[in-house]
Structures are given as structure tokens and as C-alpha cells.
Image: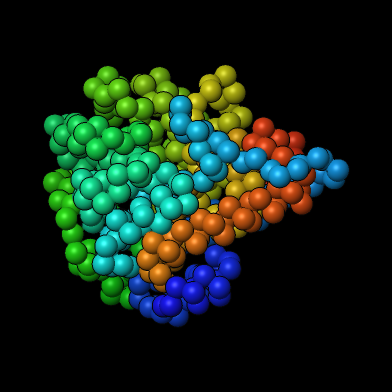
Amino acid sequence: MDKKIFMKNFVTIRQCKNSFKKKNLKIYNWVSAAAENGYTKDVNSQDLENIIIKPKLLSKTGYPNFKGSFFNLKTDSPILLAPMGHQTQFHRDGEIETCKGATKSNIISSFGTQSRMSLSDIRKNNKKAKLVWTIFPFGDLRWIKNQIKDAEKNNVLAIALCLDANVRSCRYKDLESFYDARKIGRRSNPISPNPEKSYFYDWSLIKNLSKFTKLPIILKGILTSEDAIRGIENGAKGLWISNHGGRMFNSGYSTSYALYDIKKKLKKHKILTIVDGGIEKGTDIIKYLCLGSDLVAIGRPAIYGLNLNGSLGVSKIFEILKNELKTAMINGGFNNLKSFNQDRLLLGKFKNQYGI
């Protein structure tokens, strides 16, 4: 696609998604697929829609400042790139190209052991990238520690441990389209040695790894306050509230409800919190920040951009979201990240769904 045409004509995430769908329905079905009939993925979006933002007039917003932080690193926005596997099916250079687009928009990039391109290849092609390496515990303890050593060598900011993807789920869209992404695209990152190892780990894994590395460990896949507390007690420095975009377990448990419940029950714990799930517009970001998240992670929309126009497409997606966030902050009466709190939300419809 011509760069000028893309930059001019694509102005919303919805538009990019629809164009991606028209371009290649089979690949779109793989990206949009979720566990079983996709109910949990749908609930992520539905619950966000059920949260109402209360606007505030004459708030002296000025030019809104949405600069945030990731541990000790100051960030230009509260947005980061979520890890997604098998990206060379969307673009020949996959994660390398995605990282280039995220870096252009000054976004922290998350990649991981399910990536097609290795961490060293990603780093070699992008010395300036701010990286998080996501480890799926699909090997023995020695293999996991070697992954951490490699991450340290490649100057990542943190380790994310993905705890909610022990076995590939039954995704009806995938099964019915007979499309297997694992067979498409090139690879430089070795396949994880033994996914079944993840079936047998317990919380001692977190304690062991938090003592092994000085890098902060973020637990990805947290959905309950009980697991959040266990993680903190065993040395986790960050919580990533996620149901894997609804792709792994069809529980009907949305990330917005999980975030609400965890923040309500962990008031005494100050810990970096990231959330993902269903984000396609600026007001979605505001809702998650008001519920108590420090950062939001963007997954599927970045893939739409990658498939349509490589790194330029990825960067375009992030610029769309940043612009929508800025516009929504001005119109809603938010001037900085400190102005986001639950008092700015009407949660009646949202709470009724969960019997709160």
C-alpha cells in the first residue's frame, strides 16, 4: 500500500481492522479468534462499553499531559505494545518491523518466547527500543533462567512471565477455517522445548526467579486478587491484568472487572499495574486508567497496522490512539494521569452484571 494513501486514509482503529479483514479473511480470523466461541473476548469489549465516564467542565485541562512511568522509566504515554506470537505471517520481518513502528512512536515493546524473531535479532535491528521480554514457562527451570540471562544481555527493562497460556485453547474460528499460523512465516527464534512443563509449576517458581535476576518480574495473566497477592508475596514487581485477549480460557471474566476487583482488594499494595483487553479507542484507555491501571497494552490493533503497512502501520495505530486519548481528555475534563480515578466513572451497569 502506498505510504501517503495509508497515512491519509486510515484514521480509526475500526477502519484499519475492516481493511485487514478484507485483505485476508483467513489471517484476520486467526487474529480475531478466541477460546471456543469467543465469549470472553466479547465480554472484554462489552464491559468497557458498560462503564460510563462522567465529563467535567471548565477543568483547565490546558494541553493534557499523559506522560506516565514504567518502574523508573518515564514514558510519553500510558500505552505499551503487548506481546503477540507468529508475527511473520503478517509481515516478512514480523516482530522486527513491529518494534520499529513502536519505537518510532516512543512506545515500550513487549515480545517473547512465542515470537518468530529472536530477542537478539530484534535488538540487533533496533538499538534504541525499550523492550520487555515475555517468557512462557514452556521448559525446565534451566531453560527459563537462560531466557532471563539472554534478556539481561539484550538490555530489556523487565521480564514478564506469561502464566495463563499453558496449552493451546480450542478456538472455533481457527479450527473451522483450517488455518494454522504455526506453519506460516519465517522463524529465527527457537521453538520452546516442552510446553507441558508449565503444567507442573507452582508459586515457588516466582520466588526462585525473583531471586535469580535483578530485573523486575511482571506476572501476566493475573485475574484475581488471590493470585495478585500470591504473586506479590513471592517477589513480583508488577501485575499484568490479562485474559490473553480471551484467547486461552473462555471464563467470561473480563479484564475490566478483574482490574476493578484487584484494585479494590489490594489498596495497601502499591505495585505497577498493566491491563489489556478490548482497547480500540481513546475512551477505552481512560476507563482502564480510571479503574486504577498505570498502563494499557495494545495487541490486535498493532497487528492490523503491521499487516497493512509494516512499521508505518504500527506507528499509525499508536498515533491514532494517542490522539484519541488527548482529545477525550480535553473533552472529558482530564488534565493528567492523576486526574484519573473511579469517582469519574458510573459503574452501575457494569457492577450489576457481576452482582456487586
Residue shown at 36% from the left, 27% from the top = 216
Q: Position of residue 307 (x, y in %)?
A: 38, 69
Q: Position of residue 123 (x, y in %)?
A: 26, 46
On the image, which quarter does residue 234 sit in?
A: top left
Residue shown at 35% from the left, 30% from the top = 217
Q: Position of residue 314 (x, y in %)?
A: 43, 60
Q: Vertically, is 140 above or below 232? A: below
* Image position of 149 (left or right of 75): left
Q: Is residue 21 visible?
A: no
Q: Across the whole image, how many numbered discs are drawn on residues?
A: 0
From the viewer's side, name the closer residue of 134 and 232: 134
* Image position of 317 (left or right of 165): right
Q: Position of residue 54 (x, y in %)?
A: 78, 46
Residue shown at 49% from the left, 30% from the top = 272
From the viewer's side, name the closer residue of 267 and 84: 84
Question: According to the image, what is the colour scheme of the structure?
Answer: rainbow
Q: Is residue 150 visible?
A: yes
* Image position of 179 (left or right of 282): left
On the image, which quarter does residue 36 sit in?
A: bottom left
Residue shown at 43% from the left, 53% from the top = 104
Q: Vertically, is 106 above or below 239? A: below
Q: Residue furthest right?
A: 58
From the viewer's side, name the closer residue of 294 and 292: 294
* Image position of 195 (left or right of 282): left
From the viewer's side, name the closer residue of 181 and 197: 181
Q: Quadrant of the N terminus?
A: bottom left
Q: Quadrant of the C terminus?
A: top right
